[in-house]
Image (spheres, rainbow, N blue to C red):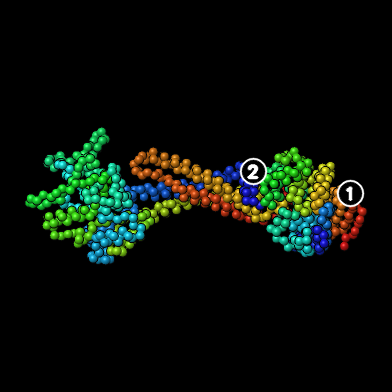
């Protein structure tokens, strides 16, 4: 069983009287420390998949297990505590608190965990330096460019050293040059800390940063390819 | 999440929206102020009535009437005396009353007849009472010169009333033989014939006019001069107090010398006994116990009760008026908090995704709402003290000192300000409850997508 294990996951939305199948029947195993990308067009169900893995959406059928724990039936509170310890999140629109400085934004997950103030700022400052924003610590999000804001977001996702980082269209609001920069930072940090990184995107260029690309179409995994070096795929396997 | 972090986050989000926070807080300030000022009027009314009543009589004092007193009080009251004529207000009864719970001090007021107190040619014309000298302190008597006696009382120890110096008559003159205690044109009091603290006074038992035997005078030892206090019974003003046992001996001697057969003290007991209760609240129970012994009593309690009833109604009415404005302020808080949730939906969503436990989100919102109530309440109380001070200043100026009461028409006791603070904080918390629950239920996913 993989580090993240999805078995027969199905998600059906009810829109009025109609049923919309977001995920048909998905089986995915992601290994610990793997850097993988879920690629799909809009409406393919890739975001739903991510949300289910992060406990933001309930699944209709199937089971999800993370690090050997069956999280399928977790309550909202249990999920919150689980995310605190195990999951970092990078948002498309950065998800920073506009009124807080970069340092305080990065420290946010540690606040929820109840970490002491000194420890919090030490670790946050360290993370900001790691993403190259050592000189921007007391700036507010509005005083920073999109790329810088996303780097703050990345620092925040990594600050608590979670086991898994989920990134939902992390470059969706950035130009291609900045996108590559941001992706480079994120992937290299994940490798450095040995963390599992799951990126959701519709952009094949972005997907190439990952060693494994899982392609989703209309709620089914249609392709799952691995490569030893990022940027190309050597192995192809058709989905069940 | 640590409470300190929740507090600082809640407070910083209040500071973020300064204008709105200030406006909402002002609503609470006005609401709190309205309640506090209104109730303070009610309390002011109550206190000034209380003070007026205290001028008429000590609220903790109970007067017990002996059989003579009861008879004088009117025949209709006789039915109240359950024990019939058999109950006697004697030393035994006084001792029993003294041991009742809630009783601090007891003294009979024994009116002594047939003795003369004089200093040279000046003779005392006022009242002479035999009282329980040792209890005077507890009964609330005070001296302006000298001091009240302690436990040990000697025969011949006396206390003068503050006005008694003017009660001495020059026996050598037939007219203009007393000095009126009215201020002269320059405002000073005329000098009385005697100096109570310096002159020597002696007491003689009167003998029948045809008698030739002379009684030996008893030298009096003046302990002090009592302060004026119209609320005390017996009143100090024109009286001389002495030890009750000595007074009874003197009375016996007079009765014997003058062949008075009828010893009223033995037959009927004391005419009046005064009891001091530990507090105003205990007056009623003490009075009830004494009544059940078969004596008729009188105290200010009944008047006080009906007065309390009335002031309570006034206070509730005024407080209700004030409460309306705090209710409006509560709506303001709820509105502010709901607005703030709409604005921060996205933030709340992000916080949830980052692993903030929903209960902590709720707590932060409650802290915010409670803080608005608390800050508003504190400022409201401060403002109330200021307004109260101004109102008292203005009314004291316009009414002059004619009201004669020490306190103003607006009185804010400590319990009122603390109560108002607790209440305004509670109102804040309650109005924040619904918005906080809403914040808790925000869908993280939808919230993040919101731009």
Instruction: Between residue B126 and residue A20, name the one nearer to us.
Output: B126
- The lab-note entry on whether marks 2 and 1 share a chain reads no
Count of numbered badges drawn on the protein:
2
Task: Find residue A30 and report its image quarter.
Answer: bottom right
Q: Mark 1 — residue?
A: A231
**Kind of element beneath mark 2:** helix
Badges 2 and 1: C-beta atoms under 8 Å apart? no
CA distance separating discs 2 and 1: 45 Å
Q: Residue at x 74, y 50 (%)?
A: A160
Q: Eyeballing the image, is A158 above or below A134?
A: below
**Mark closer to the observer (2, 1):** 1
Q: Residue at x 89, y 54 (%)?
A: A226
Q: Tell me residue B151's x, y (percent).
A: 29, 52
Residue A146 seen anywhere in this rendered image of the structure: no
Percent across and percent down for residue A72 are 75, 62
In the rendered image, which quarter is residue B187 located in? top left
Identify residue for label 2. B16
Residue A221 position, x and y percent, is 85, 59
Name the foreground residue: B310 vs A136: A136
């Amino acid at each position: 069983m993989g580090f993240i294990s999805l078995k027969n996951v199905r998600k059906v939305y009810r829109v009025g009287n109609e049923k919309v199948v977001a995920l048909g029947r998905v089986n995915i195993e992601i290994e610990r420390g793997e850097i993988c990308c879920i690629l799909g067009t809009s409406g393919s169900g890739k975001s739903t998949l991510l949300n289910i893995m992060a406990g933001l959406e309930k699944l209709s059928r199937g089971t999800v297990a993370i690090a050997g724990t069956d999280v399928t039936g977790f309550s909202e509170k249990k999920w919150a505590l689980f995310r605190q310890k195990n999951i970092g999140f990078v948002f498309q629109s950065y998800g920073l608190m506009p009124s807080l400085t970069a340092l305080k934004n990065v420290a946010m997950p540690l606040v929820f965990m109840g970490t002491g103030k000194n420890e919090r700022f030490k670790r946050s400052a360290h993370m900001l330096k790691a993403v190259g924003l050592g000189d921007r610590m007391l700036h507010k999000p509005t005083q920073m460019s999109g790329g810088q804001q996303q780097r703050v977001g990345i620092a925040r996702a990594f600050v608590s050293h979670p086991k898994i980082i989920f990134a939902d269209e992390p470059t969706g609001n950035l130009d291609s040059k900045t996108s590559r920069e941001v992706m480079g930072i994120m992937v290299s940090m994940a490798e450095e800390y040995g963390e599992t990184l799951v990126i959701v995107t519709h952009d094949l260029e972005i997907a190439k940063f990952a060693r494994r690309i899982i392609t989703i179409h209309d709620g089914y995994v249609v392709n799952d390819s691995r490569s030893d070096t990022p940027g190309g795929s050597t192995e192809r396997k058709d989905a069940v | 999440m640590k409470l300190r972090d929740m507090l600082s986050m809640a407070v910083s989000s209040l500071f973020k929206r300064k204008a709105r926070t200030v406006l909402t807080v002002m609503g609470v300030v006005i609401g709190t102020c309205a309640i506090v000022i209104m109730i303070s009027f009610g309390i002011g009314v109550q206190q000034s009535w209380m003070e007026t009543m205290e001028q008429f009589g000590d609220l903790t004092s109970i007067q017990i009437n002996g059989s003579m007193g009861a008879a004088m009080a009117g025949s209709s009251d006789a039915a109240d005396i359950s024990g019939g004529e058999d109950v006697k207000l004697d030393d035994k009864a006084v001792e029993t009353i003294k041991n009742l719970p809630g009783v601090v001090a007891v003294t009979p007021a024994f009116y002594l007849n047939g003795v003369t107190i004089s200093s040279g040619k000046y003779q005392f014309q006022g009242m002479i009472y035999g009282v329980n000298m040792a209890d005077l302190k507890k009964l609330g008597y005070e001296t302006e010169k000298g001091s009240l006696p302690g436990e040990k009382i000697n025969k011949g120890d006396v206390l003068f009333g503050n006005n008694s110096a003017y009660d001495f008559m020059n026996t050598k003159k037939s007219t203009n033989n007393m000095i009126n205690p009215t201020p002269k044109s320059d405002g000073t009091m005329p000098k009385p014939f005697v100096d109570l603290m310096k002159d020597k006074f002696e007491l003689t038992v009167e003998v029948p006019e045809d008698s030739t035997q002379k009684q030996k005078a008893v030298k009096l030892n003046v302990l002090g001069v009592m302060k004026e206090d119209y609320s005390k019974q017996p009143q100090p003003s024109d009286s001389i107090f002495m030890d009750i046992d000595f007074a009874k001996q003197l009375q016996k001697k007079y009765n014997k010398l003058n062949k008075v057969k009828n010893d009223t003290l033995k037959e009927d007991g004391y005419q009046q006994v005064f009891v001091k209760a530990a507090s105003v609240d205990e007056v009623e129970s003490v009075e009830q116990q004494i009544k059940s012994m078969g004596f008729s009593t009188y105290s200010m309690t009944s008047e006080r009760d009906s007065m309390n009833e009335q002031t309570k109604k006034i206070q509730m009415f005024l407080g209700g008026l004030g409460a309306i404005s705090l209710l409006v302020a509560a709506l303001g808080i709820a509105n502010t908090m709901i607005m703030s949730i709409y604005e921060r939906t996205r933030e709340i969503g992000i916080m949830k995704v980052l692993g903030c436990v929903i209960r902590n989100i709720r707590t932060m919102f409650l802290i915010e709402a409670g803080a608005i109530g608390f800050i508003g309440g504190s400022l409201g109380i401060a403002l109330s003290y200021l307004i109260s001070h101004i109102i008292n200043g203005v009314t004291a100026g316009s009414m002059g000192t004619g009201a004669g009461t020490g306190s103003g028409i607006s009185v804010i006791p400590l319990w009122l300000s603390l109560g108002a603070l607790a209440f305004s904080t509670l109102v804040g918390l309650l109005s924040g409850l619904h918005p906080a629950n809403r914040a808790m239920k925000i869908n993280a996913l939808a919230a993040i997508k919101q731009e």
